[in-house]
Image (cartoon, helix red, strand yellow):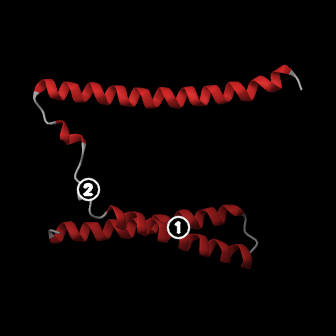
Amino acid sequence: MDAKEVWIPIIAIVFTFGTTFGIVFYYLHTRNKQRLAMLEKGVDPKAFFPKPTANKLASLKWSLLLIGVAIGLFFASLIDHNTDLEEGAQFAMVLLFGGLGLLVYYFIVKNNVQDGV
């Protein structure tokens, strides 16, 4: 093994961990500065902790998306076994039915907002 073959993975790992640490440190540092600025101005910092019931329909959105992806995978396997289409058609089925699940979510939320729920 050459020296270059040894150093490349080591440098990649160090760079990955360094970047991750930098992003986390920057996030925590700016969040702390923002909270301190809020305290100086007399604003309640509890605004950073939203109520858990802020989005009551979030679980509905994710469940409809995952159901759509599952149906897409099912139809993709049917297409794979019954036709000679390429993998792109299978990928398209997953995206199509996942998008249909989000579309169903949109109409449910739209109807609930109009009804005042």
Q: Earlier in the sequence, mark 2 or mark 1?
A: 2
In terms of image quadrants, where is residue 49? top left
Is disc 1 placed on a helix, strand or loop? helix
Query: Looking at the image, which residue is at 71% across and 72% down?
Result: 80
Amino acid type assigned to the residue bearing label 1 in the image: Val
**Quick one: which residue is furthest to the right in this view?**
1
Compared to 101, does 28 lie above or below?
Answer: above
Can you give x and y, in whole percent of width and height, for residue 79 in the image? 68, 75
Left or right, 67 with respect to 60, comes to: right
Q: In this view, does 7 lie to the left or right of 49?
A: right
Q: Nearer the viewer, residue 15 or 71?
A: 15
Question: Which residue occupies the extreme top position in the image?
Answer: 3
Q: Residue at x 29, y 28 (%)?
A: 32
Say which residue label 2 marks: 52
Residue 59's tag is none
Above or below: residue 101 compared with residue 11: below
Given the image, on which type of amino acid does mark 2 rest? Pro
Number of the label disc, if any, that sits on residue 69: 1
Which of discs 2 and 1 lies nearer the camera? The answer is: 2
- Alpha carbons under labels 2 and 1: distance apart: 26 Å
Q: Residue 3, position in %: x, y?
A: 84, 20
Where, by quadrant of the figure, is residue 52 drawn?
bottom left
Please count the marks in the image.
2
Give the x, y percent position of residue 1. 89, 26
Q: Residues within 10 Å of mark 1 (few under 14, many from 20)?
A: many
Tell me residue 67's x, y (percent).
48, 71
